Image: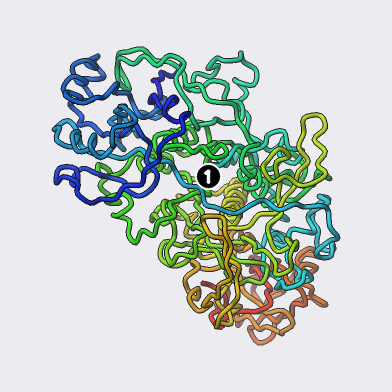
Amino acid sequence: MKNIIPVLALLAILCTACTKEIHDNTGISQELSHKLVGGTAGEIVPGSILVKLDEGTVRKLENGGLKEVSAQLLEGMDASSLTPAIPAIPKNVEVARKYGLHQWYSVNFDPQTKPQAVAARLAESPMVRSIQYSRFIQPVTTGEAQPFEGLPMTRSGADAQFNDPYASHQWNLVNDGSMKGSVAGADVGVKDAWRLTGGDPSVVVAVFDCAVAYRHEDLKDAVWTNEAEMNGEADKDDDGNGFIDDKYGFNFVNCFAIDEEYVGGMLDGGSRTAIKGQPLNSNKGSGHGTHVAGIIGATNNNGKGVSSIAGGTGNGDGVRLMTCQIYEGSSYCVDAQTAAAFIYAADNGACIAQCSYGNYKIITNDYDYINGTEDISGSPLENAALKYFLDPANSNHESLEGNIAVFAAGNHSNPYSAYPGALPYVISVTAFGSDYLPGGYTNYGPGCKIAAPGGEYGNVKGDYSGMILSTGVSGAATPSPGVDTGKGESKNYVYMQGTSMACPHVSGVVALGISYAKKIGKKFTRDEMTSLLLSSVNDLDSFNPGGTRDYVKNNLDGTKENVQIDMNRYKGQMGTGAVDAWKFLMAIEGTPSVMAAVGEKVQIDLSKYCNPSLEYQVSIDDASKASLGLASDPVIRNGFLEVECSKIGAGKVLISSSVGKDPEKEDGIGSMSYSREISIVSRPYVAKNGGWL
């Protein structure tokens, strides 16, 4: 059984009507300025501050020296306790120590005392390496969920892969251009990818958000389950992972230790006790986490609701969705609890962290956010825990060395990605609409890595079709009308928009990629997988006409205003391009992709792939031919493969030949056959450079 330690004693503090203060960096002491990490932006938790202690002091604590250390560190201060910041001992203690997670402690004091004063006193102690204000994390705002009432189909069902009844409303998955104002192909490129894989249950995606509605009719078969807790006793840590009753994940908001007594440190001595969390609660707020989860892995081909990117093919083959609840209505996690969530995800099998949250302040460099990217001693607690999740030693899938974190770029129209998404080791996602144009809300520019469908409210009141349809919550603040919640199952579906919705599109595509790598027996490092993803994109700038565009902006205070947006600002600033699931799978497979404009006869130079002076035969399977809309098979003339696509789609062409045959003797030396596959991707427009980047 794994050893555990108590969480910081924040329950009483967080359950009160906290006086959330925003502090700046003016007037602080020189000692504090040298030790302060994580910056001063954001809403600060009263009555608690985080400190990173030096190794010698931590060894004393681990050997039972709590009274001695507390007396020295807290002398003359009105501080009540010193407790470890991380609620449970990480599974990989060696990696946890590598990132200094064992050195982080919480100093708890009177909530009426200003945190700056406590920080200044702590900075004077030689035992303190770093100091961090304990802050509430910030969600990426998306506005209210909008109702879905089973309106007439927004596009034809001719390209439907599955029998999910509302799939025809999901332009983000398959966009044929029939929806008013849309552009054919402005989607995630998953239709053809489903011919290769629909996902794999060995891929676990941790959803850092509101709780996922695990009873939802379209999610109940997709949620990750902890079998030891499912079959264990209530109010008991049945699997010994340090968390009680974590059947579908864990609620980190206001989590607390059953026994708050603390004596020792991370490894040795002292009483240890499991962490108790509030039950997963998907009803508060707008059902944001449930909506995000449905985009990634709502069960496909089950005759219910919506389709998803990696929800399988109806044979139990979709990815699994783990809840790491960091929001509950208007209650948010603090830094230490978010850090605990990353550690939990790493220790319990997640290989992807889906994170639709971030700092809304404009931060222009990594140092301002983490006080250095390489020197982990200057890193705030949340970032150290994120590095723990990403570390190759904590890999949770056979086809991926390391894990992957995906963040929303932010919805404040800022010319920088929000952090943590802007960090160089995670993926930040911008958003575009059904017309391939950037969403008027999306952040853009430095720190942004890739774009995905995020949706946008239409110009006609009540027209939500341009937003993203996914699973919703019946008891949420803005439920759909006429919801039947019989037998405890939610049958709710809603529209939302934002980079919060774009983010899970990329998480879903990454999940497909890992699933396909497993299927074909390949393994990649995180950097290799990320590189393949970022280079498997479609051009966005070709659809941006420049000039200005009218947009209704949702302000932070809930008001709306009409603004004009300069569309030129987005050109080259949305990341490498629009994510494409088919291209990504082809890159994983090692098959080159060639772009072809719809309605044009394209000549593909075969000299890039084989010796064009030899004789070749070309063949194509029926599914690829149908997807590309080919009236006849491709042909080879003068070393060029000729193809004319009438539809947006993707497929593979097989080029075959032989070598080594003695042409003089029929019964002489025999030939060796060989072949090469080429992926054809047809889109309405192809950039002159072939569409890459």
Q: Residue furthest bottom?
A: 638
Relative depth, front residue between 504 and 328:
328
Spot occupied by residue 367 in the image (x, y as percentages of width and height) = 29, 54
Is residue 670 in view?
no
Task: Classify 606 as above or below 39.
Answer: below
| Quarter of the image where one finds residue 416 | bottom left
Mark 1, other Cα within 10 Å: few <14 / some 14–19 / many ≥20: many
Residue at coordinates 66% horizontally, 77% vertically from top-left?
A: 596
**Visual colour scheme:** rainbow
Q: How many marks?
A: 1
Residue at coordinates 39% horizontally, 20% vertically from top-left?
A: 5
Relative depth, front residue between 339 and 346:
339
At label 1, which amino acid type do we have?
Answer: Ile
Apparent side of residue 251 relative to residue 18 in the rendered image (left or right): right
Apparent side of residue 85 relative to residue 492 in the rendered image (left or right): left
Residue at coordinates 50% horizontally, 32% vertically from top-left?
A: 253
Spot occupied by residue 550 in the image (x, y as percentages of width and height) = 60, 75
Relative depth, front residue between 112 and 302:
112
Residue at coordinates 41% horizontally, 61% vertically from top-left?
A: 447
Apparent side of residue 14 relative to residue 165 in the rendered image (left or right): left
Spot occupied by residue 437 in the image (x, y as percentages of width and height) = 60, 72
The residue identified by callout 1 is 352
Name the element at disc 1.
Answer: strand
Is residue 451 in view?
yes
Task: Classify 604 as above or below 555.
Answer: below
Spot occupied by residue 425 in the image (x, y as percentages of width and height) = 40, 52
| Quarter of the image where one finds residue 672 | bottom right
Task: Classify 255 as above or below 515.
Answer: above
| Quarter of the image where one finds residue 644 | bottom right
Relative depth, front residue between 604 and 94:
94
